[in-house]
Image: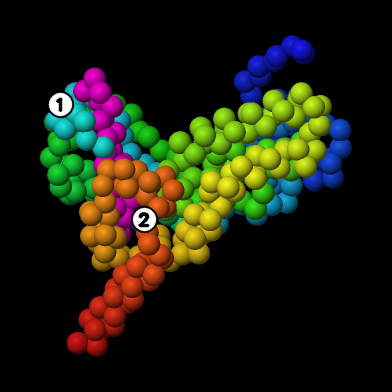
């Protein structure tokens, strides 16, 4: 087995498409150093480095998050909440959860069609939520903010995760759940899966697309149908006002804890996407009546 080498540097370029078809994958670092490898597992997040080099389209939507970590937090120490989207606070929804040891996290997100991070708008929305959104404004009023938490999550998977000598994982592949923008768990699960396939490829000394596609096939078995269904309405889902989200909350309030977990992880228990369009139609009808009368 060859020597392992750890390099702490930033990748500025992945070799272009025609070179990805060769005997090695080549990376160019910001330091100017060039690295070659038999196999690349790209976890570059919203940079989409390998996808762009191969010529795959990046994710069409991005959830941009901004929040804070709190200390001296002594109330609701076991509560964890996914907060519904809001035009006042953020179309991507938000979060509140305790971390233990008198710590908590709170924040909001905005979904856009651009990968550019709208920091000022996000901060304004977040501080509005921290001031106005009950009960969280009260729960956190005596806590001490210690650091900001921010980032961007690509939404909707890229076309293919596995190519010749390349596997793409996590946000770099757009694997966050379209329906709840949950990225950490999916990145860990798919990182583990791609690692297992990488071990098989090294044992066979075969890094062809045919071998690495097992990663894609396994992902498809579990996720493809759910992600396709959610992708159909992603363009409408993340840009509605609060009346549509209120309709969803009424439906999900009847879920058991297990059903709610399955809803967040697998987009289960939706019955059909018809319920979303019914809520959307009601919202539009209400807007028309308001405009007329």
Residue pictured at 33% horizontal, 76% vertical? 281
- Label 1 belongs to which residue? 74
Q: Is residue 87 above or below residue 166?
A: below
Residue pictured at 65% horizontal, 44% vertical? 216
- Residue 122 visible (yes or no): no
Structural distance between the alpha carbons of marks 2 and 1:
35 Å
Locate residue 96 relative to residue 119 in the image: left or right: left
Asked where in the image residue 291 lies, by quadrant, the reply is: bottom left
* Upstream in sequence: badge 2 or badge 1: 1
- Residue 136 visible (yes or no): yes
Q: Which residues are magenta?
A: 81-108
Asked where in the image residue 5 lies, by quadrant, the reply is: top right
Residue 39: x and y, percent?
A: 74, 30
Task: Please say whether residue 96 is one of the residues in the magenta stretch.
Answer: yes
Rendered image: mark on residue 269: 2
Q: Is residue 118 above or below residue 278?
A: above
- Looking at the magenta stretch, what is its main secondary structure? strand
Residue pictured at 77% horizontal, 13% vertical? 2
Residue pictured at 50% horizontal, 51% vertical? 155
Q: Is residue 268 above or below residue 69?
A: below
Q: Is residue 250 above or below residue 198?
A: below
Decide: few, some or many residues near mark 2? Use Cα within 10 Å; few <14, some 14-19, many ≥20. some
Mark 2 residue element: loop
Residue 245: x and y, percent?
A: 29, 61
Residue 202: x and y, percent?
A: 76, 25
Rendered image: mark on residue 165: none
């Amino acid at each position: 087995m060859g020597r392992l080498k750890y390099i702490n540097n930033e990748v500025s370029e992945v070799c272009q498409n025609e070179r990805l078809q060769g005997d090695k994958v080549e990376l160019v670092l910001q330091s100017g150093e060039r690295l070659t490898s038999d196999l690349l597992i790209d976890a570059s997040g919203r940079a989409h480095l390998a996808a762009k080099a191969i010529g795959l389209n990046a994710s069409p939507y991005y959830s941009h998050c901004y929040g804070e970590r709190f200390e001296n937090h002594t109330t609701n120490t076991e509560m964890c909440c996914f907060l519904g989207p809001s035009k006042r606070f953020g179309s991507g929804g938000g979060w509140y959860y305790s971390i233990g040891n008198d710590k908590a996290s709170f924040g909001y997100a905005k979904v856009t069609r651009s990968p550019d991070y709208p920091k000022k708008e996000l901060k304004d929305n977040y501080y509005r939520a921290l001031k106005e959104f009950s009960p969280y404004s009260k729960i956190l009023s005596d806590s001490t903010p210690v650091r900001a938490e921010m980032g961007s999550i690509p939404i909707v998977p890229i076309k293919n995760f596995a190519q010749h000598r390349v596997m793409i994982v996590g946000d770099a592949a757009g694997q966050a759940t379209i329906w709840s923008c949950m990225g950490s768990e999916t990145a860990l699960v798919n990182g583990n899966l791609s690692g297992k396939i990488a071990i098989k490829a090294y044992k066979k000394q075969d890094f062809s697309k045919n071998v690495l596609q097992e990663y894609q096939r396994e992902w498809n078995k579990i996720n493809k149908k759910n992600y396709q269904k959610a992708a159909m309405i992603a363009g409408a889902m993340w840009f509605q006002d609060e009346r549509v989200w209120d309709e969803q909350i009424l439906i999900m309030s009847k879920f058991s804890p297990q059903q709610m977990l399955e809803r967040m992880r697998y987009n289960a228990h939706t019955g059909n996407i018809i319920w979303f369009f019914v809520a959307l139609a009601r919202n539009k009808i209400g807007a028309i009546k308001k405009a007329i009368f």
